[in-house]
Amino acid sequence: MRVLVLYAHPVEDSFNAAVHATAVQTLREAGHDVDDCDLYAEGFSPILTREERIKYHDVPQNRGPVSSYVERLLAAEALVIVTPVWNFGFPAILKGFFDRVFLPGVSFRMEAGKVKPSLHNITRLVGLTTYGGTRMRAFLAGDPPRKIVTRVIRAVIKPFAPVTYLAHYDMNRCTPQTRAAHLVKVAAAMKAL
Ligand SMILES: Cc1cc2nc3c(=O)[nH]c(=O)nc-3n(C[C@H](O)[C@H](O)[C@H](O)COP(=O)(O)O)c2cc1C
């Protein structure tokens, strides 16, 4: 399966870097064709410009400034997102990817003012996230990253596609054991893709 891994962390020795490395290595060992998109390393600009906003609904010209990323997204059969949770959202670089690349004519189309999901090439979705706070704290805040993966992105991919959300909560009090156990779960989720 062709898997697009969207990775959003700036530090090479972070725990997210370990999650990312585990995911990519396990996917490759399982024989998947991995497109490893490291947004920081690639210098992805998250800024949706004035010009892009004006042309947002002009299909297909709207994809011009990010055409290579659109091609990579449309070539994928599975999407794996690896990211920390910052301010109960995604790092700006990843949020910007959704703003700039999940465009009309790419992830959805507009029909009589209604949004029709169209990212049906994606038949598997996985969110691999980390939180400093506990799951209860995230729950009380509404846990937006979990909902964005399991509801918002789920809604635009192939209907009934399997979705996995795997989070290490409470990283402020993590131990080598909790981190190692989480990486085992990450590898298992990638093997099961
Ligand atoms: C800018 C920033 C904002 C953060 N906001 C939150 C937050 O809203 N909720 C939370 O649980 N953790 C938050 N954290 C903690 C991170 O989620 C935590 O440091 C990260 O998951 C640990 O992974 P890492 O070691 O790979 O960076 C934040 C951290 C940073 C740097």
Image (cartoon, rainbow, N blue to C red):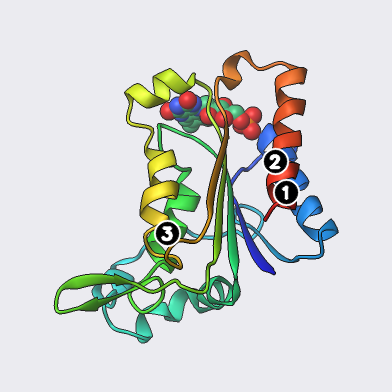
Q: CA distance from mark 2 to mark 3?
A: 23 Å
Assess whether mark 3 and mark 2 are in contact (beta carbons under 8 angstroms).
no
Q: Please state the horizontal and vertical placement of residue 131, each as a whole percent of the image.
A: 53, 28
Give the structural element (helix, strand or loop) at label 2.
Answer: helix
- Residue occupying image coordinates x 41% and y 25%: 138
Give the structural element (helix, strand or loop) at label 3.
Answer: helix
Q: CA distance from mark 2 to mark 1?
A: 6 Å
- Residue occupying image coordinates x 39% and y 74%: 118
Q: As displayed, is residue 141 above or below residue 53?
A: above
Residue farthest toward the right in the current orientation of the protein: 29
Q: What label sits on residue 179 in the rendered view?
A: none
- Which label lies toward us, 1 or 3? 1
Residue 47 visible, this angle? no
- Nearer to the camera, 181 or 101: 181
Q: Please state the horizontal and vertical placement of residue 189, each as a whole percent of the image.
A: 68, 46
Q: Pointer 3: what residue?
A: 98
Return the disc, 2 or 1, that comes first in the chain's sequence: 1
- Residue occupying image coordinates x 37% and y 71%: 103
Q: As displayed, is residue 95 above or below residue 167?
A: below
Q: What label sits on residue 186 in the rendered view?
A: 2
Q: CA distance from mark 1 to mark 3?
A: 21 Å
Instruction: Give the quarter of the figure containing the C terminus.
Output: bottom right
- Nearer to the camera, 120 or 142: 120
Q: Pointer 1: what residue?
A: 23
